[in-house]
Image (cartoon, grey):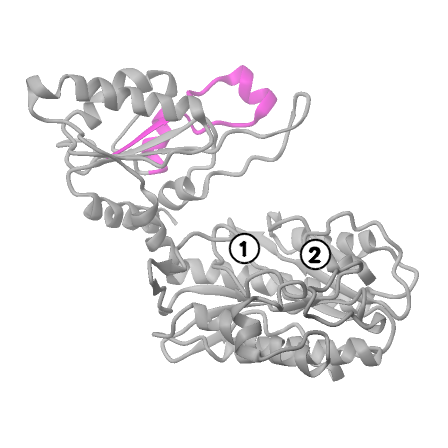
Amino acid sequence: MQPEHRQRREALMSKIGNGTAIFRSAPSSVMHNDVEYNYRQDSDFFYLTGFNETEAVAVLAPHHQEHRFILFVRPKDREKEVWSGYRCGVDAAKEIYGADEAYPISELDEKLPQYIEKADRIYYRLGRDKTFNDKVINHWQRLMRTYPKRGTGPTALEDTAPILHSMRLVKSKTELEMMRKAADIAVEAHNHAMKFVAPGRYEYEVQAEMEHIFRMRGAMGPAYPSIVASGKNACVLHYVENNCQMQDGQLLLIDAGCAYGYYNSDITRTFPVGSKFTVEQKILYELVLEAQKKAISQIKPGNAYNLIHDTAVRVLTEGLVELGIIKGEIDKLIEEEKYKPFYMHRTGHWLGLDVHDVGVYQHGENPQLLQPGQITTVEPGLYIVPDTKPAEDQPEIDPRWVGIGIRIEDDVLVTESGHEILTAGVPKEIKELEK
């Protein structure tokens, strides 16, 4: 993808004019004591460079006469590479990743000033690495102190997110190929899980079967901790213990996706552990499925993003009223969010290099408008959480609904003429889910 990474850098540099942008790689993450998790690069850093090592800094300086793209990386070190894996090194950073210049990371403080001293502003996103935040700020402050004598230099520190994340929001052809692959692998895993699930098996067995397929098909692994929630466990939105034995008569909610080439899929299905839905399960499931279908129908270029959520909320609220779970006038119930004890999350999120991908949903009072190349999840749900205390003006919850949790989620691409459901290969109609 190096030509595409170069195109992204060029696009960003065209937007920052006489500024200099600085990006920091993700730090290594400790699992326990001196054991680290598998390394995962910062998404912004990877989007612009394709470089997958820690302790690196990328600098984009479009105004510099010789070096517009600069990498600071760990030097080659044979002894450390024997223990922890091969390093790209300084020379290969230029040859492989297209840097105009590369330096050892130890020379950052010495070399960085030449790339920011003539910029009119520094573009940098303050992150969780306070030490590096302070480093960038200190370089900026030093240049500001000498500004009166030179009359040039960065007079502002600006976040890269508004510019870069709007670029990441619209996927290229290459990115769509990656996301289709991630979706296809997750579809296969979900379909296998549906055949594998049976009363008496454990949630973690289902998780293992799915994640086995992720790795066997070339995915990096799960996109996020897999949720395999049977019975009332499905009322916990981010249930990840996955340690219960599944029983006949329960529903099983599986929320699982994979990462392929850093791009993610995200699918949820809810279906019977045994052969059939109970009457109550079927009623609530049909309501959630209707909400999802109508929400997806709102996905087309030019429509406001919030229409997806608003549509799902109205369908679910009307259904809850019809079932006697809440009571009142529909518009008022929505305005006062009386549905929230049973539907407490949004209907979707952007999807891409991050599972909850970057990109705004609202521009002040103006909603984000959908455009071709964006990918969003659509995932309405209903959760009749045990021990839920209804508001004073609301009825007691009939025990027959309690403990049922349902969510249905697909990944949907905005196309030129409407939308495409990338994860449509996983069944969700009741007749397809019952055995």
* Pointer 1 or 2: first along the chain: 2
**98 to 228, vertically: above or below:** above
Q: Quadrant of residue 18?
A: top left
Bin the neighbour count of mark 2 within 10 Å (Cα to Cα): few under 14, some 14-19, many 20 and up: some
Find disc 2 in the rendering and name its residue. Answer: 213
Find disc 1 in the rendering and name its residue. Answer: 264
Comparing 349 with 65, the one in front is 349
Q: Amino acid at mark 1?
A: Asn
Q: Quadrant of residue 205?
A: bottom right
Q: As drawn, is 87 to the left or to the right of 107?
A: right
- Tell me where residue 329 appears, x and y as whole percent: 58, 80
- Tell me where residue 106 appears, x and y as whole percent: 37, 16
Q: Which residues are magenta?
A: 69-97
Comparing 279 with 83, the one in front is 279
Q: Is residue 112 visible?
A: no
| Callout 2: SS | helix
| Callout 1: SS | strand
Q: Amino acid at mark 2?
A: Ile
